[in-house]
Image: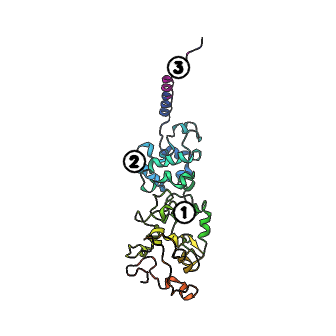
Amino acid sequence: MLRRAAPLFLLIAWAAAKSAHAAAANQYVGSEVCRKCHPDVWLNFYKNPHYKTIASGKEPPERTGCEGCHGPGQAHVEALGGKHNIGAFSEMTPQQALEACLACHRADLGKVHIERSAHTLAGIACSDCHSIHRSPTPKFLLAKVQREVCYGCHGNVRAQFAMPFKHRVNEGFMECSDCHNPHGAPAPLWRMGLRPRLVEAALTTEQPCLKCHSDKRGPFAFEHPAVRVDGCEACHQPHGSMNARLLRRPAVFTLCLECHTGLGAFGRQGDGIAVQSATHDMTNPRYQNCTTCHVRIHGSNADPRFLR
């Protein structure tokens, strides 16, 4: 006679008991045990921000030292090594690595958007940018100098920073993270939601440009819609340009005439954007540099035509 199959609930109970037994057998052994086989990692671990969990003595074993990231190490020690019995990040999927890091970093305000960020959605893992054990940088445990980490994927941006007029990232004056949050940024508040992703807003709502260019902040009695609505990128290339002042066009008047055509029913009042007056002969070099007269082009408190 055929043996009757065991009821489903018994199989579930057996599997749960087996899992619990395996978990009980794999205990935390402490980072000092790891030190014996991994002296190269431990050599500089005291400089690592993760070391503070050991030094504090207040954290439970599952959040302390090596095992705080790699999991309990008893099975790994008893097997004399191996990646199959320890939480090896080189064997994890990007999502698994992210979950391991978020076990502690989920509370960081700068990482609240990481699970829906462009990097995560593209399958970028934390360990693709960070080197937890052997970081050569003084901040953020990056695998390389920050700009080199970003250039590894963003080669087009590297080329832009090599142009004659650019922000001084290659010179070390500023970093990519001064404007971007690689862990994700909130929904956009300018350019009708069409701004580049991962751009970190200044003061929660403003473009990051205003963190340095505070004289353009306003509010102004007479605002230039191209600045307030479209944003700085309506006229400027943020990374680098062949044109002075990072402008998108070499001649100022050609940039202004992209909007000031007198056509259409758009604009702040829905009456289109004003065209230059008949006294302006745009073929005359005298009138071709608009900002010679319209000096307050980013906004004015005195003149609706931005003359002062």
Residue receiving disc 3: 6
Q: Amino acid at mark 1?
A: Gln
Q: Nearer the viewer, residue 209 or 49?
A: 209
Q: Amino acid at mark 3?
A: Ala
In the displayed structure, 11 sits above or below 215; it is above
Which image quarter holds the C terminus?
Answer: bottom left
Cβ atoms under marks 1 and 3 closer than 8 Å: no
Task: Give percent across and percent down for residue 304.
Answer: 41, 79
Residue 122 visible here: yes
Q: Amino acid at mark 2?
A: Gly
> Which residues fall within the magenta stretch?
4-15
In this view, the mark in front (3 or 2): 3
Residue receiving disc 1: 146
- Identify the residue at horizontal 45%, vertical 72% (top origin): 271
| Left or right, 61 with reference to 165 | left
Residue receiving disc 2: 57
Q: Nearer the viewer, residue 140 or 187?
A: 187
In this view, the mark in front (2 or 1): 1
Name which of mark 3 and mark 2 comes first in the sequence.
3
Cβ atoms under marks 2 and 1 closer than 8 Å: no
What separation in Å lies between label 3 and label 2 (alpha carbons)? 48 Å
